[in-house]
Amino acid sequence: MNIRLFLLVLLTSLAALGGCEADRMSEKGFSLPPGDAMRGREAFLYMHCYECHSIDGESFPKVPGAEPPFVELGGKVSSVKTYGELVTAIINPSHKLAEGYPVDTVSNDGTSRMPVYNGYMTVQELIDIVMFLQPHYEVYVPPYDYRIYP
Ligand code: HEC
């Protein structure tokens, strides 16, 4: 085998290996069973999510001394909040910070101010909370004025 061929074979195998590595970390095939929205609302209450979140169309107990930021969940959004995005927002809050807030209010140097619940939130609670939250999002298409140019 000449050296060029050898290098070519080596590089293609490395590229293929790299591809496999990326595939292994892919979210492809990820699917959770349906949850129970009523139980999700209860979990939202007993896990005190409402200390930092308001939800369009829901009222929660007032929290004495609670300090904003109140990050609104639900309401009008410009694109569908997918199931995956909501699950990620809860189990990996710093992955992508909520839009529409000054970075300093919702994070410390890019790390979300939201606590990480992964150590004690059960998978069932996660599924139920997401089931509860999702219908509160309403996709809003901004009005678009057509202007016909002659
Ligand atoms: C101490 C305050 C605090 C508590 C308690 C809290 N969060 Fe948050 N949450 C935040 C902040 C700040 C953000 C915005 C930064 C970010 O996207 O992580 C956020 C973002 C989110 C988002 C993404 C919103 C968006 O528009 O992208 C979801 C969903 C969410 N929280 C769900 C929950 C749930 C469910 C609970 C309870 C289990 C909870 N949070 C408890 C502070 C909190």
Image (tube, rainbow, N blue to C red):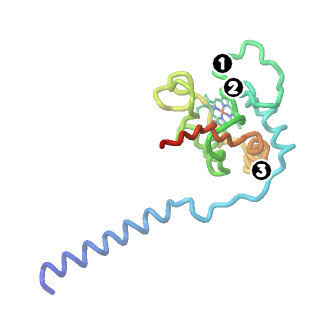
Please name whichever residue, 43 or 149, is drawn nearer the observer in this view of the structure: 149
Say whether residue 105 is left or right of residue 55: left
Compare marks 1 and 2 and give the one earlier in the sequence: 2
Residue found at the very far right of the displayed protein: 38
Give the CA distance from mark 1 to mark 3: 28 Å
The mark closer to the camera, 2 or 3, is 2
Q: Quarter containing ligand 1?
A: top right
Query: In the orientation shown, which residue stands out farthest toward the bottom?
Result: 1
The three-letter code of the residue at mark 3 reads Gln
Identify whether 23 is placed above or below 136: below
Q: Is mark 2 within 8 Å of ligand 1?
A: yes
Measure the alpha-carbon separation of dots 1 and 2. 6 Å
Residue 139 in percent (x, y) is at 68, 43
Name the element at disc 3: helix
The amino acid type of the residue labelled 2 equals Cys
- Estimate the x, y position of residue 25 in percent, counting from the top left: 50, 60
Residue matched to label 3: 124
Q: Position of residue 40 (x, y in %)?
A: 81, 42
Give the tally of numbered discs. 3
Q: Nearer the viewer, mark 1 or mark 3?
A: 1
* Point 18% across, 81% down: residue: 5
Residue of label 1: 68
Up/down of 129 relative to 61, above or below? below
In terms of sequence position, does the residue under pointer 2 or pointer 3 come before the other? 2
**Number of other residues with Cα within 10 Å of mark 2, as a class: few under 14, some 14 to 19, many 20 or more:** some
**Of 68 and 1, the residue lying toward us:** 68
Q: Secondary structure at mark 1?
A: loop
Q: Say which residue appears at 54% left-offset and 39% top-offset.
A: 147
